[in-house]
Amino acid sequence: MTEENISHAKEKIMGMDKNPSHIMPHKLTLDSKIKFRCHPGVSCFTACCGNINIILTPFDILCLRKRIGIDSDEFLLRYTKPIFIQQTDMPGVQIHLTKEGRCPFVTEEGCLVYTDRPSACRYYPVGMADFHEGAQENQDTEKFFFLVKEDYCKGHEEDKEWTVREWRSDQGLDERDDLNKGWMELVMRRKSFGFQATLSEEAQKMFFMASTNLEKFRDFIFHSSFLKIYDIDSQTLDEIKTDDIALLKFSYIYLASSLFGTNELKIKEKKIKERVADISNKQKNAEKNAEKVYEELKREKELLQKQLDEKNKV
Ligand code: SF4
Ligand code: SF4
């Protein structure tokens, strides 16, 4: 793996918006060993909690706003700023740093939301990349890990040795990745489209709402025409009414279906019939209009011919 490839792949990971020169050009596997330990005794404690772009996944937002005890609206307003996710036209949010450039959750004693800290913070300093050549959908992707080594981070000088697998398990990353997967797949899929086909403003708003504000998304499902259009089984409906994780997973399915036309969500038979009837009516009207225009042109031509004939007689 060349350094150039790693820096390309880095663009596909969460939150590690760091200088590529600090990424070690070694491809790591789950069994690779790393030496690292971060604890309040290190001289650089919390040095990494500033001057960084921490992109929040939908699950990060859910965990953080619950931890703080506020709703999504207030959380988004107080702690985030809107962004476009790198190389896409998909809107998202990142943590809004203080005017000193520090994370609003950091104190001298450490992270105030440690057990609910975002995925990007858990990844540091072991990045993961989902790398695939070209832009073909469903193409095999290659997952690998790499180490981010910055001069100020003294954790690399500690004696603790572990495998990447042990490190990830300690950081709770397997569960996080599982819950972030649907969102990551949407972003990756969008990236593979490039900017040739931009998302409509309506689609962007829907993506933003469903991936940052689950309360609003729930309200949209139960208080709009949504349930008149989609055929959702009663068990799923019961779950998403009260269970935020079920709703989060459902939002990924809904977004994949509405943005990329996947067929995991069934549209009601009646709606399909109405749509077909609508298209057929539009087609019939278009044909009628075309016939009308043709007849008018024919009449005009005949009139002109008549006028010409009369002129020739004179
Ligand atoms: S959330 Fe916690 S770990 Fe992450 S940057 Fe902020 S203070 Fe540091
Ligand atoms: S050791 Fe590294 S990760 Fe830990 S506080 Fe210091 S800079 Fe941050």
Image (cartoon, grey):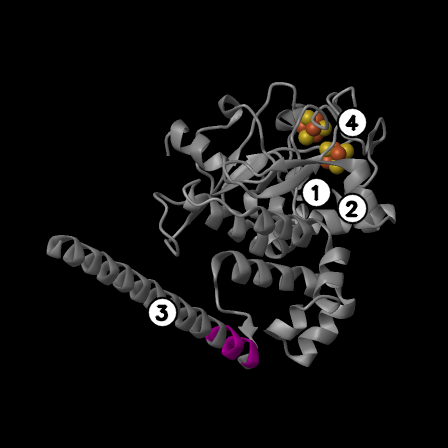
Separation (CA) of disc 1 from disc 3: 57 Å
Q: Position of residue 57 (x, y in %)?
A: 65, 46
Separation (CA) of disc 4 from disc 2: 26 Å
Q: Is residue 171 left or right of residue 183?
A: right
Proximity of marks 4 and 3: CB atoms separated by less than 8 Å: no
Decide if ligand 1 comes within 8 Å of the CB at mark 3. Answer: no
Residue segment shown in magenta: 270-276
- Circle on res. 64: 2
Nearer the camera: disc 1 or disc 3: 3
Residue located beneath label 4 in the image: 41
Whether residue 107 is visible, yes or no, is yes
Q: Earlier in the sequence, mark 1 or mark 3?
A: 1
Q: Position of residue 10 (x, y in %)?
A: 49, 35
Figure check: 252 above or below 227: above
Decide if ligand 1 comes within 8 Å of the CB at mark 2. Answer: no
Looking at the picture, which amino acid does disc 4 mark? Gly
Q: Nearer the viewer, residue 188 or 169?
A: 188
Separation (CA) of disc 2 from disc 1: 8 Å
Q: Earlier in the sequence, mark 4 or mark 3?
A: 4
Q: Is residue 217 left or right of residue 128?
A: right
Proximity of marks 4 and 2: CB atoms separated by less than 8 Å: no
Q: Position of residue 176 (x, y in %)?
A: 65, 52
Q: Residue at x 45, y 30 (%)?
A: 7
Q: Residue at x 73, y 22 (%)?
A: 44
Decide if ligand 1 comes within 8 Å of the CB at mark 1. Answer: yes
Whether residue 26 is visible, yes or no, is no
Residue 314 is one of the magenta-drawn residues: no
Residue located beneath label 3 in the image: 287
Residue located beneath label 1 in the image: 118
